[in-house]
Amino acid sequence: MKGTKKNLTEEYLYLDFSHQTEGCIFPLHTSVTLFLLSYCDCRIFKVCLVLTKESTNSSLLRDVLSQDIKIQIISRQELPPIVQNCCLPAVVEQPDNFCRAGLAIVLRHIIQKSYEVDPSKKEILELLGFKKTCLKACAEVSQWTRLCELTIPLVIENFLREASEQPPAVPVEIRQLEKKLSEPVRVHNDDKLRRQKLKQQKAAQVGPPLTQGHTPETAEDGESSSRSLELRVAFSKLRVQGQTAATHREPPHIRKAKASDLPPLEHVFAEGLYFTLTDIVLLPCIHHFLVIICEKFSEKLVEFPLLASWYQRIQEVPGVKTAASKCGIQFLHLPELLTPSNEQHPNLSDIPGSEEQNDPLFVGGPRPTMTKLMEKGIEVMFSPHPCPTWTLDWNGLPAAVSPKEGKMSIDRALRKQQQLNNLVYVVTNQAKPGDRIVDFCSGGGHVGIVLAHMLPSCQVTLIENKELSLIRAKKRSDELGLNNIWFIQANMEYFTGMFNIGVALHACGVATDMVIEHCVKIRASFVTCPCCYGFIQNTSKFSFPKSEQFKKTLSYKEHMILCRFADQTAVQLPPQQRLIGKQCMCLVDLDRARAAEERGYSVQVISMEPESCSPKNNMIVGVPV
């Protein structure tokens, strides 16, 4: 049939299964994944529930599983080796060397495959949101992805566990979500919609009052005025995908209204006006939270009017009730809550280190900061390059090994080869037969493919969260016939395997710090080439400066000055400015090196040769002592 993809690769979907209670499979990541499969009516995966412990009772599973999904129950020992190195959920293509792991990546993949099988299901693809970016940003750097993908499911699991014994405190993350629903909505065409809302409000002042309804009605120009503009926009999109309202010129007083005078848009769904994957993720979690609240702590329900309203509204989405009933979710009928919550919620945008922003002693610019470090004996210092003239015999290697196969310009491919010369020399001199090498943030696999070819007795794993890059890498690997290479599409924290050497070429911002941390935790060597210093900032896992030596000298804000100026190394900049940028790069990386040394590593900061191979030409090499 036209538009339908044929001969789809057989794929296995692996889900954790620890236990079940009252219509819910734990962990909640599994409940969420099964709910999406049911909503998409997706039957193309072979689904395996993986017992987290051998004593798990699976006899009642049929009460909470869609009858449309065929499920096999296996032990953890039966998992393919590549999956044993990842957190579940995970999807594996045959022949077991390409794996996708982590909730958001797996859910996005299910949506894409469901659409490939039946391209008429455009509403399924719309779950990925505007520009298909819903939950695409990794949880390590996106607070919103972390809240929805990791934190909410985890805290609700803990809440349900504690509620069986004693009245637990409501998780602060649930209050964060309630607060999020109260914030104004930002969408790509919000100016136009806010002017329509202003027009609606002006009309209401001279006509009957407008109230927000609860049931979808036909959305024409003469549609029921009882529905808010936000609800009409959201549900008209759900009924007819791609349909847009007729465009007409607004009255002059609406067109000329200042942006600051326009009314804000209110949330209909979790991310704004439109039903997305985020709502799919949150629904099983919030449902089970509300079940406990209504059963045992009903007086607390009034604290969550927006969550309750969202919960009622999501049931109106076509297909949601059917999918929920197949998964054992029996929706609650909640009372209408009109009282807004006045409780102060934690600020989602709070970032560790923000207290530094108003430091009265702060002096801007890199020179005062560099001088301050020099006064403490910390100066720009590079370790000598172990072999500055060494190079791979690129002409003697198969074509698919070369970065020229990555569809880049001749000049860029030459610089990439020079970068690879540096990393490959260090790794090949450290590696021993049987070692496991991980290429983090692998992109198109330039580093990992060379290493797998040069070190056939080592197992090389490429980890990358961008699907297309990894698919290109696998195509090159298949051309070479490599059998010592794995491909894992996942965020870094979903990789749990043991390895001997971690490598990363131009891992962006704090990704370099995440790679080093991953290596240090298991006492693996690391070879990293940092990039995008300007994107460095405090996160839930890291605070800067990292080393005790730098912490005693610099504030967070002073360290950020170094990071911002470290990005000023582009070839088109004046030589003196590039020199300062290079010095700032070195100091930022020296802080990283000192932090690793404090944890038992011998670390060198080396400048790659030739320096012209990249404006970001530092290499941090660490070996456990």
Image (cartoon, helix red, strand yellow):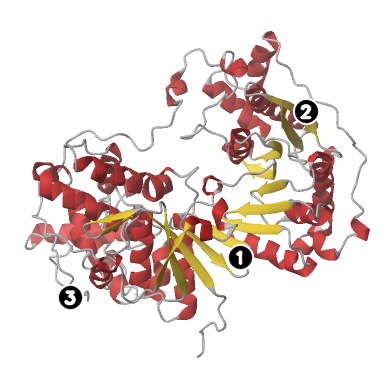
What's the amino acid at mark 2? Gln
Q: Earlier in the sequence, mark 3 or mark 2?
A: 3
Q: Which residue is mark 1?
A: 96
Report the residue at 75% width, 40% height from top: 615
Instruction: Looking at the picture, tell me which residue is in the foreground, 215 or 490.
Output: 490
**SS for tag 3?**
loop
Instruction: Looking at the picture, tell me which residue is in the foreground, 121 or 365.
Output: 121
What's the amino acid at mark 1? Asp
Q: Residue furthest left?
A: 208
**In this view, 19 is above or below 578:** below
- Residue 533 location, x and y as percent? 63, 36
Q: Which residue is mark 2?
A: 576
**Can residue 583 be seen?**
no
- Residue 183 location, x and y as percent? 28, 45
**SS for tag 1?**
loop
**SS for tag 2?**
helix
Q: Which residue is mark 3?
A: 222
